[in-house]
Image: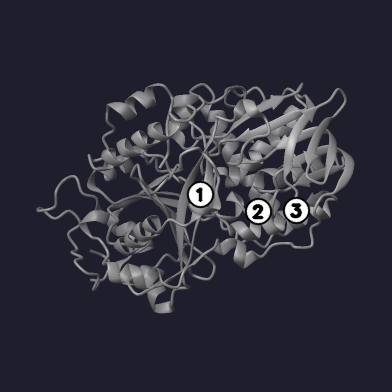
Amino acid sequence: MAIGKVYERNIASRRSHHPGWRPNLVPKEAPLHTTVFERHPTSAFVLTQALSSSINQPYWVEHAGTDSTLPRFSGTLSCDLAIVGAGYTGLWTAIEAKRRHPEWRVVVLEAKDPGWAASGRNGGFVESTLTHGESNGRSRYPDEYETLDQAGLDNLDAIEAAVTEYGWDCDFWRVGSLAVAVEPHEVEWLTDGADGEREIFLSAEQVRARVNSPTYLGANFAPRDTAMVHPGKLSREMLRTVRELGVEVFRNSPVQNLDARKDHIRLGLESGEVSAHRVALATNAYPSLLKRFSLHTIPVYDYVVMTDPLTPAQKKDIGWNGREGIADMANQFHYYRITADDRILFGGYDAIYHYGGKVDARYEERPESFAKLASHFFTTFPQLEGVRFSHRWAGAIDTCSRFSAFFATAHQSRVAYAAGFTGLGVAATRFAAEVMLDQLEGETTWRTELQMVKSLPTPFPPEPLCYPAVQLTRAAINRADHREGRRGLFLRTLDTFGLGFDS
């Protein structure tokens, strides 16, 4: 959700004492089917030591804190706009609604605490893409991709402007991102994709001069398409602005049902009800109050580890002074970034769907995923062996089959719904807020006329079919990474029909 994917697919370092490490990244004796992370694994002792003191809690939320002064809803009220969910989507919708209609009474109803779910668990990559990358966007929306691409850049510019306008203290850095090749066949993908303007190709020596990992064989650098942010601080600052604009926010107030009446929409809560002229649903991976869309998303769990702050010597060993976001280019990819206090967040690779498609806190503890991430971290940065992880956590991604957000209305366009961000929602949620408000106002705009907005993704099959289908897809993705990225018949068939499941 970033936690989620940063890019779609389409020795300069010092010698380390990392067990078994060899500067030759593709030794002649290595089987072709192994990855760099399998060729250079980390010892069990190192992993145990590194993870032993970590706590299962999102660092961002712990560091930014939560607002316990917000009330729990009780009683009855009427409003112009009710927003269900106080993550990024809900908070952006509240901000943009008050920009457009300062006179509106706007109410936000949050089941727990604002920003506690995906908005407080992601990697902090603020991506311009609205379509999960160029390849996915061009294949699905060939006639409007250029419009969507520009809209994504404009959206990122608008977020940057909001940070300045409202004075948000959220570690927002427009520093770009690196797509790194860690296998020989990925270098060709890089050179095919770099245009010299939006993306710049970097050789192994050039990328290692920016971030020093012996796994890097090259990279594409996109200097303006990505910003980094502290997700918890962003949620906190957005909440502050929402309240300053006069929006009423209620925590610990889950909405249990939605009922359309002739002149209003009734939202039923445990301790009261809200009557609204308009409703925006911003529930992300949680079940939609519109049952018709129950199969359009599934919750997929993504896992993350976060290190203690690096010492000055450790920081010097890896460089990374530009603080770019990084993702490797495999089908099963990693994403990672460095924080203001020099911690490294390292996540991705595993994408776990649990039978029944439920969001459950029990799924947030998965030792095998955390151990795998820790091992891959030390393969990437063997010179950091001895660093400990302070935090580990997981979160549910609202995955849809087209990898990018979809939009829907109900009850004569008095209810708007956006979901399916598939790990790239930090920026796209603002665009979604604009779309939903256009729809709720009953206006025909360039946004509402987009095919991306007017169409829906293919729903996932119901259980008991969904779980085995996802597992087959995960296995096929893993096979592709062990066949030099070549996608087999099963994945090619899914591609043909516009279906997918992201790692």
Q: Nearer the viewer, residue 355 or 376?
A: 355
Would you name the residue on which mark 3 appears?
251
Instruction: Evaluate whether residue 10 shows in this view.
Output: no
Vertical relation: 125 (above or below) 61: above
Label 1, label 2: how far apart the Cα atoms are:
14 Å
Disc assigned to residue 115: 2
SS of the residue at dot 2?
loop
Kindly check if marks 2 and 3 are in contact, taking CB atoms under 8 A apart as contact: no
Q: Which quadrant of the structure image shows residue 379?
A: bottom left
Seen at 60% across and 55% down, the residue is 120
SS of the residue at dot 3?
loop
In this view, the mark in front (2 or 3): 3
Q: Amino acid at mark 2?
A: Gly
Instruction: Evaluate whether residue 175 shows in this view.
Output: yes
Q: Amino acid at mark 3?
A: Arg
Seen at 82% across and 48% down, the residue is 247
Q: Upstream in the sequence, badge 3 or badge 1?
A: 1
Q: Amino acid at mark 1?
A: Ala
Q: Upstream in the sequence, badge 2 or badge 3?
A: 2
Would you name the residue on which mark 1 appears?
2
SS of the residue at dot 1?
loop
